[in-house]
Image: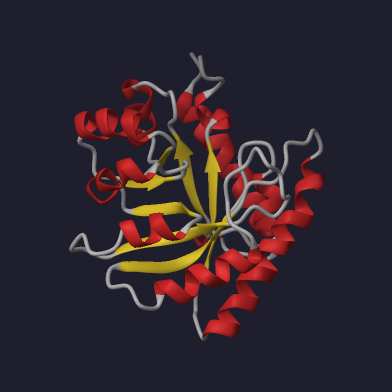
Amino acid sequence: MNDIAGSLGVVRERILEACRKAGRSAGDVRLIGVTKRVDRERVRSAFRAGLSDFGESYLQEARTKIGSLEIPVTWHMIGHIQTNKLKLVPGLFHYVHTIDRLEVLEGLDGFGQPIPVLFEVNLSGEGTKHGTTGEGLRKLLERAAGLKTVQPVGLMTMPPPAEDPEEARPYFIKLRELLAAVNGEFGMAMKELSMGMSADFEVAIEEGATMVRVGTAIFGERS
């Protein structure tokens, strides 16, 4: 088992260095520890080491894990959401990163308390990835304007897997530019860019990421 506190310290140093390189403040980047298939004790270890944001991909796993951990942290839904499980989301998560279709957007509305949401955009056009298109994003934003409790705060993407982190840079640039474009078109002020994972989060930070989703670099390889 890896030293989670030590790994977390290394990741934070890498974030700090990437921010220095980009002329940004490290306080502008939120580190989300991805706890998919990570056991509770390792999650607690990361919490004790100072990590306060965690991301889950599977609702059933999250339901069991979050309910039993009882630690005061911010939980992010970063996986694909099935419509038949939508009702579980507001009670578990503080942020949702993966809005990609109208039925999910509308299904999250009206649960009583506001929930910040990000829209997942598939910039690579890969059929194996979830996410909407630029045109689909605009339709989602049009609909969001008429809803009560969902609060659009930004965009999320996942570039294609690559050995060289630099290959992800064009996708991060595109997402940043898309955020600026739709903010202008819709008179919005969304600020969040959820992009970058263990292999490429430094490049993402250089291109404006405000949230990075890091699992392996903190928790090690999953079983």
- What residue is drawn where x is 52% and y is 31%? 218
**Residue 180: x and y, percent?**
63, 76
Q: Residue 128 or 208: which is nearer the viewer? A: 128
Q: Residue 116 or 81: which is nearer the viewer? A: 81
Say whether residue 107 is left or right of residue 181: left
- What residue is drawn where x is 56% and y is 20%? 221
Colour mapping used in the image: secondary structure
Instruction: Classify residue 68 by image quadrant.
Output: top left
Instruction: Classify residue 164 by image quadrant.
Output: top right
**Residue 156: x and y, percent?**
56, 55
Q: Is 43 placed above or below 173 here?
A: above
Say whether residue 145 is left or right of residue 6: left
- What residue is drawn where x is 25% and y is 47%? 87
**Residue 141: x and y, percent?**
49, 72
Say whether residue 95 is left or right of residue 32: left
Q: How many marks?
A: 0
**Residue 175: x and y, percent?**
66, 62
Q: Is 205 placed above or below 192 here?
A: above
Say whether residue 39 is left or right of residue 178: left
- What residue is drawn where x is 31% and y is 57%? 108
Q: Residue 136 or 190: which is nearer the viewer? A: 136
Q: Is 57 placed above or below 134 here?
A: above
